[in-house]
Amino acid sequence: MKKSPKKKIFAISIFIASIVLSSCSNSIKSESNPTKKISTDKTAIKIIPASDEDMFLYRQIGINYLCMARQIEVEFPKAISLAAKNYALLISSRHGGLIKQVGKEKLPDKNIYNGAVLQILDGAIKGCPEMVPEEDKKKFLNTLEQLNQKE
């Protein structure tokens, strides 16, 4: 069987196009590889302490998370724990555990977490009180009293 020249040219052009496109694809992938562009020099990353605005935002995110989780019937201990862990993770990862109000001292994750629980509970009691169990409201008020007595 004899092939027509048009079919032969078409087949060759598809073959060449596939080779060209595959080589372009490989060069695009290697150029877009973000790991090659990241500097390993830790001095290049400047950690900025969390500002009052940052803290307000993270607090609101935590409160909203808690209230929404409770609306879909997530158990309170799980909801508050995840909301506070998210809050603490934001401060640790974005700000290296530094908070402007506290000063230049890096806070341990446990302290950030405990502070987050109190702040989120306070906001949830004000914003969605029906989503916070009465027992937890009482514990929060007792803890607040104890903290105020220490000051």
Image (cartoon, rainbow, N blue to C red):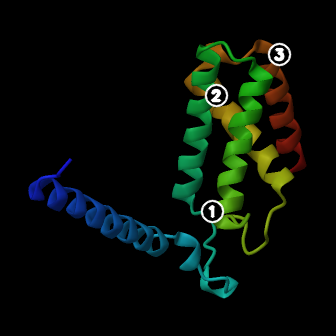
Identify the residue under disc 3: 135
Residue at image x 62%, y 38%? 62
Q: Which of marks 1 and 2 is nearer the N terminus?
A: 2
Q: Earlier in the sequence, mark 2 or mark 3?
A: 2
Q: What residue type is labelled 1?
A: Arg
Q: Which residue lies furthest to the front in this view?
A: 1
Residue 150 is marked as none
Residue 94 is marked as 1
Counting from the top left corner in percent of width and height, residue 77 is at 80, 24
| Pair 1/3: label in front | 1
Q: Image quarter for residue 140? A: top right
Q: In this view, does 107 lie above or below 86?
A: below
Q: What residue type is labelled 3?
A: Glu
Q: Tag 2's secondary structure?
A: helix
Q: In this view, does 70 lie above or below 19?
A: above
Q: How crowded is mark 2: few (under 14 residues within 10 Å), some or many (20 or more)?
A: many
Identify the residue under disc 2: 66
Residue at image x 72%, y 35%? 82
Residue situated in front as seen by the camera: 1 or 65 = 1
Q: Earlier in the sequence, mark 1 or mark 3?
A: 1
Q: Do the residues labelled 1 and 2 touch (CB within 8 Å)?
A: no
In the image, 96: left or right of 147? Answer: left
Residue situated in front as seen by the camera: 1 or 17 = 1
Counting from the top left corner in percent of width and height, residue 4 is at 11, 53
Q: Tag 3's secondary structure?
A: helix
Q: Residues within 10 Å of mark 3 (few under 14, many from 20)?
A: few
Q: Residues within 10 Å of mark 1 (few under 14, many from 20)?
A: some
Residue at image x 61%, y 79%? 45
Counting from the top left corner in percent of width and height, residue 118 is at 75, 38
Residue at image x 65%, y 24%? 125
In the image, 52: left or right of 31? Answer: right
